[in-house]
Amino acid sequence: MDLKLADLSLLADSFWVFFSAVLVLFMQAGFALLEAGSTRMKNAGHIAAKQLLSFSIAAIAFWAFGYGLTFGDGKWIGTNNFFLSTPTSTGSMPVEISYLFQFSFAAVSLAIAWGGFAERAKLSVYILFGALFTIFIYPVVGHWVWGTEGWLHELGKQDFAGSTVVHLQGGVAALVATLMLRPRKGKYNEDGSVNTIPGHNQVYSVLGALIIWIGWFGFNPGSTLTLKDGFFGYVALTTNLGAAASVLGAMSMAYLRRQKLEVSIMVNGLLAGLVAITASCAFVEPWAAIVIGFIAGSITVVSASYFEKRGIDDPIYAFSVHGVAGIWGTISTGFFAAPRLVEKVGIGSAGLFYGGGLKQLGVQTLGVTVTILYVAIVSFVLLSAIKAVVGFRVSEEEEQLGLDISEHGSYAYPEHHQHIKEQETISPPSTSVSDDVATA
């Protein structure tokens, strides 16, 4: 059977989007390693397992309602194509591939939110909030920004691959959760001083971050939705430069503050740069991508320290990495959006530094503001309802033992914990925060 050139082009674009979706979906493995490595040994299995559980729930919820609410017709919210019921028109990409790609983004946003729940939330909370977030939170802002009739889209908001839609939403939900759950036991002393609770495996954290970095080449370049003219390569370039510069920015800030280059700060710096460049990757020149990334890494270090010292225990610094960097990345196009790239993408106007005035900066700021308000309010309402119905936080005893055993019946590292028990029969355990049982 002969294929026309247009058919071949559509086939190539469809495969590109499918391949990009697979890359983004594989980021879930990165998040599992990153979060498990950044938390204590007694919770590692639970952290990894909830990733699998919530991913499964979100897949069904986004198929049933989330995709239609995000991309259906309507100014404020999508009103059709639930259960992917609208047939694909001739000459268009199959809706099943579009769903898979867009679901991968929703799943990343949900994975970010889980950072604020880590080490103290009940497993049932992940099940309920995972479904509710995928239906009532993520699609609303997604429609405003990415829906063809969305009101922020019509205003010209620039968010190429989701600094606002994906990362800011997840970061704000994480902040609300961590505020409602309150700090982990042993994180703060009576005088308010901070105890460091280190993650159990820095190698896992670094490996997870590297997997996420690779997956991001599906995230940003894949958002071109086409192989035509090779623009996806340009987006990959700015993405890579922003990420690399952010690692250096985080390292520089950390060294200025502590004269140490902590592994966790380098990891968070990488992620912050990827988050920040996600909105602007198609709108800015390579030099601007480096500036955006370097600033993202720097401010994330300061933000994480600021919140921790004020009694906000965000175990993997989800809000600083995805929320604060997401805000900066979104607003940055208001400064750096280059006219030639704005014309190519066809969204919004040039940034302040290119003579565009305050117009684009105002639109970007408006988008950030309404997103924070909507996600914070709805997350609080939904989590309050969940708390009233099934409870929210595990008991103090369950938290002390670890969620691996209390929620799943076994530890991810059973030999280690058996050794701890054997040692306890020989001598009483210390009550210090650094005790193996408390920090394992």
Image (cartoon, helix red, strand yellow):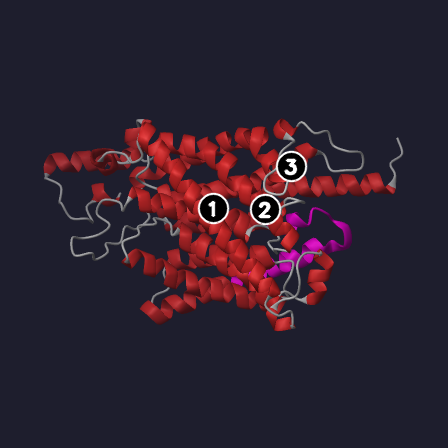
Q: Earlier in the sequence, mark 3 or mark 1?
A: 3
Q: Nearer the viewer, residue 369 or 42?
A: 369
Q: Secondary structure at mark 1?
A: helix
Q: Secondary structure at mark 3?
A: loop
Report the amino acid beneath label 2.
Trp
Residue contact at pointers 2 and 3, CB within 8 angstroms: no
N-terminal of the two: label 1 or label 2? 2
x%, y% of residue 350?
Answer: 66, 66
As drawn, is 342 to the left or to the right of 319?
A: right
Q: Is residue 23 left or right of residue 112?
A: right
Q: Residues within 10 Å of mark 2 (few under 14, many from 20)?
A: many
Image quarter hosting the C terminus: top left
Q: State whether residue 397 is above or below residue 186.
A: above
- Image vertical order of residue 363 relative to residue 406, above or below: below
Q: Reply above or below: 205 against 357.
A: above
How far is disc 3 from disc 1 in space, using C-alphas? 20 Å
The disc label shown at residue 167, or none: none
What segment carries the magenta color?
218-244
**Mark 3 highlights which residue?**
72
Could you classify mark 3 by the number of other residues whose Cα lies within 10 Å: few (under 14), some (14-19), or many (20 or more)?
A: many
- Whole-Å distance between the Cαs marked 2 and 3? 11 Å
Q: Residue at x 53, y 62 (%)?
A: 244
Instruction: Give the labeled residue for mark 1.
Output: 374
Q: Which residue is the site of mark 2?
A: 144
Looking at the rendered image, the quarter that the N terminus falls into is top right
